[in-house]
Structure formats: C-alpha cells, structure tokens
Image (tube, rainbow, N blue to C red):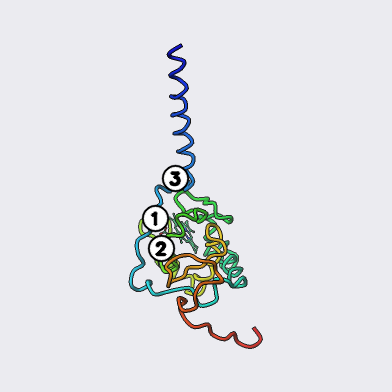
Amino acid sequence: MVMKQMKVPQLAVVFGMGLFMVACGGGEGEGPIVPPPPAPAEYADKHMPAGWWADAAKMEEGRKIFIGETNPDVNCASCHGKDGKPVKAGARDFRVGERMKLYSDSVWIWRISEGVPNTKMKAWKSKLSEEDIWKVMLFERNFGLAGKGWDADKKSWVDAASVSAASAAAPAAPAPAGK
Ligand code: HEC
C-alpha cells in the first residue's frame, strides 16, 4: 500500500520530465537558444533596403531563390526545407522564432554571405548578390517571424510596416517608371 502511494508522485515526476524534454525539443536538437555572435564590422551596418520588409514581390523573388528555382546551384530548401522544416541534420530551423528573433538583419546577411565555419552552411556571396540575399531573407523570416522586420533603431523585430525608414540601409529609390 505504501509502495503504491509512492508510485504516483514518482510517476508524475518521470512523466513531467518527459513533457519538459518534449517541450524543450522545440528547437529540434538545435541546443539551447542563445544569441548569435555579433556581425563583424563589415556587416554591422548593413540593413534591409527601405520599404522591402513589406514588399511581397521581393519576397516572392526570395522564395524562388530559396527553393532553387532561380538558380539550381542555390537551393537553400535542400537543407533548410521548403516549408522551413530542416531536411538535413544540423540545418538551422527558421521556424523557431524565439531563436531567430535574436538575429538582426545584419547577422543574417553576414551568415548567408560568409557561411558558418565548420558546418555545411557555406558562403553564398559568390552566387548571390547582396540584393538577392535580402530577398531570400524576406522569405526565410516567414517561417518564424512572419510579417516582421528588423528595426535597427529599436534593435528588435517589429511589424514590417512600422520599421522606421531611418533604420533602413538607404533612402528608398524611386521605382523606375514602367516597373
Ligand atoms: C548543404 C546544406 C545547406 C544549404 C544548401 C544551406 N544551408 Fe543554411 N545552414 C546549414 C546548416 C547546417 C546551418 C547551421 C550552421 C550552424 O551550426 O550554425 C545553416 C545555418 C543557416 C543560417 C543561420 C546561421 C546561424 O548563425 O545560425 C542561415 C541564415 C542560413 N543557413 C541561410 C541559408 C540560405 C539563405 C541558404 C541558401 C542561399 C542556405 N542557408 C543554404 C545548411 C545549409
């Protein structure tokens, strides 16, 4: 009888720990959520061009780059997954908004340009222009940060439409006529 009474709390503990581990597995084995290293000086002042965070056409171009439609040699989805669910072990899971919100747009462009040393994530700057990288970022942020944009003044992700113009890279160039 005494034994039986002991079992309930013990089971609860074991069960609770199981739940805890499942809950913490949200990052799919990516380990604890820690901020990325700061972007090096060369990238620290690079930001999404003004007005792009809310630009659906640019985001669509980014989607085509991401899935390898624009250039079969550049297929982010082959590791990161078309729907953001990684298909190659170790590839960053962009659906984990709690982690991705710790990445500024500068860190993001730095990593895509230069890659992550000693991982399968290689440098893409020889295959993608800076504009292409911004476009692909517009698409990638949807998985965990849909509708958001990095506000460099506030140093945080805010609603895409409210990213302050002053925090963008350059004043918006007037769109060429007929485009
Ligand atoms: C061959 C597989 C592979 C391909 C293709 C690939 N990645 Fe990655 N990517 C990875 C891996 C693995 C990581 C995790 C690196 C690490 O451990 O920090 C990663 C990480 C990242 C990160 C986060 C970097 C960080 O510091 O956490 C970004 C952003 C990213 N990739 C974007 C892209 C983009 C954009 C493309 C396409 C242009 C792409 N990746 C193509 C494997 C890939």
* Side of 34 relative to 70 (left or right): left
Amino acid type at circle 1 is Thr
Percent across and percent down for residue 36 are 38, 59
As measured in the structure, the alpha-carbon distance from the residue carrying label 2 to the one carrying label 1 is 8 Å
As measured in the structure, the alpha-carbon distance from the residue carrying label 1 to the one carrying label 3 is 15 Å
Which residue in the protein does label 2 denote? 115
Which residue in the protein does label 1 denote? 119
Could you say which disc has been placed on residue 151 in the image?
A: none
Q: Nearer the viewer, residue 157 or 117?
A: 157
Percent across and percent down for residue 103 are 43, 62
Please give the name of the residue rendered at 53% of the width and 82% of the height, measured from the top-left corner.
Answer: 172
Indicate which disc, 2 or 3, sits on the residue closer to the N terminus.
3
Please give the name of the residue rendered at 61% of the width and 68% of the height, measured from the top-left corner.
Answer: 60
Q: Is residue 82 above or below residue 10?
A: below
- Quarter where residue 24 is shown: top left
Circle 3 residues within 10 Å: few <14, some 14–19, many ≥20: few
Please give the name of the residue rendered at 43% of the width and 19% of the height, measured from the top-left corner.
Answer: 6
* Secondary structure of residue under mark 3: loop
Which residue in the protein does label 3 denote? 29
In front: label 2 or label 3: 3
Going by the picture, which residue comes out furthest to the right?
178
Q: Nearer the viewer, residue 58 or 116?
A: 58
* Secondary structure of residue under mark 1: loop
